[in-house]
Image: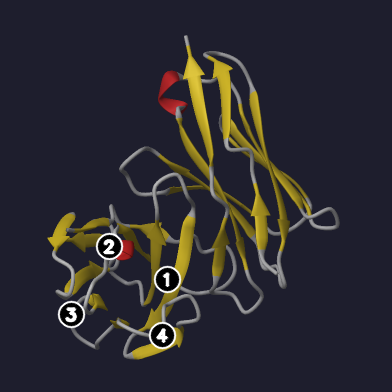
Amino acid sequence: GQNIDQPTEMTATEGAIVQINCTYQTSGFNGLFWYQQHAGEAPTFLSYNVLDGLEEKGRFSSFLSRSKGYSYLLLKELQMKDSASYLCAVRDTGGFKTIFGAGTRLFVKA
Amino acid sequence: NAGVMQNPRHLVRRRGQEARLRCSPVKGHSHVYWYRQLPEEGLKFMVYLQKENIIDESGMPKERFSAEFPKEGPSILRIQQVVRGDSAAYFCASSRASGDNQPQHFGDGTRLSIL
């Protein structure tokens, strides 16, 4: 079956670093995406991994291990505006169907 | 440089009525995806369309739901004879191509409420 697991909620302090984990079991794999979604708004694209390793983009980094079915999103120098849901999504082989996890709600406190 | 445009933002219907949700993709994007999101849950894939073609509708209920993406005009998600369980946020996304690292760009969604 298709399954993507993420923690439901996390809390971190402004200025700190937080790592949001994602494990997946899907019938196919053609890339993993991370999206940010503020309450009541559209998801916005953060990162994409298709090969093993770390992709860095400013304060955000994403890691992938295909053999372990595992990814994480790393957020550095947390800001209050980073409080949002973070969605892990896996694109199926064939290229178009994308399976989303339930999302991790991150609360950043002062 | 308009992004994905969805309308209406909010839609209220009574049980048994029809709901029509519209989505205009980013200019130049020919791939459209519809998702449903319940509160506190992730996005559930419904259907993937290209111009005038349904490519994958495996996530869409077999009855009452239909989608189209005509040659001219927006993509339409149509729900007939709505029931309370149809209440959700419906998001549309578009992309230039289906493969490689092309991310999907999302609209702000339509919040459907069934009375």
The amino acid type, in three-letter code, at marker 2 is Arg
Numbered mark located on residue B96 in the image: 1
Labels 4 and 2: the sequence-earlier one:
4
Q: Are marks 4 and 3 in contact (CB under 8 Å)?
A: no
Q: CA distance from mark 4 to mark 2?
A: 17 Å
> Which numbered circle lies on residue B84?
2
Question: Badge 1, how many Cα within 10 Å: few under 14, some, many 20+?
Answer: some
Q: Residue at x 45, y 82 (%)?
A: B57
Mark 1 and mark 4 residues within 8 Å of each other at the beta carbon? no
- Residue B59 vs B42, above or below: the answer is below
- SS assignment at label 1: loop
Q: Residue at x 18, y 80 (%)?
A: B73
Q: How many marks?
A: 4
> Marks 1 and 4, how far apart in space?
28 Å
Assess whether mark 2 and mark 4 are in contact (beta carbons under 8 angstroms): no
Tell me how far mark 3 sits from mark 2, CA to CA. Answer: 29 Å
Query: Mark 2: which secondary structure?
Result: helix
State the separation of the CA atoms marked 3 and 1. 17 Å
Q: Is residue A98 left or right of residue A56?
A: left
Which quadrant holds residue A10? Answer: top right
Residues tagged by mark 3 and mark 1 found on one chain of the structure: yes
The mark closer to the camera, 4 or 2, is 2
Report the residue marked by disc 4. B62
Crowd tier of the residue under label 4, counting other residues whose Cα lies within 10 Å: few below 14, some 14–19, many 20 or above: few
Report if residue A14 is visible in the image. Answer: yes
Under tag 3, what secondary structure?
loop
Disc 3 marks which residue?
A: B73
Q: Amino acid at mark 3?
A: Gly
The first of marks 1 and 4 along the sequence is 4
What amino acid type should be assigned to the residue bearing mark 4? Lys
- Amino acid at circle 1: Arg
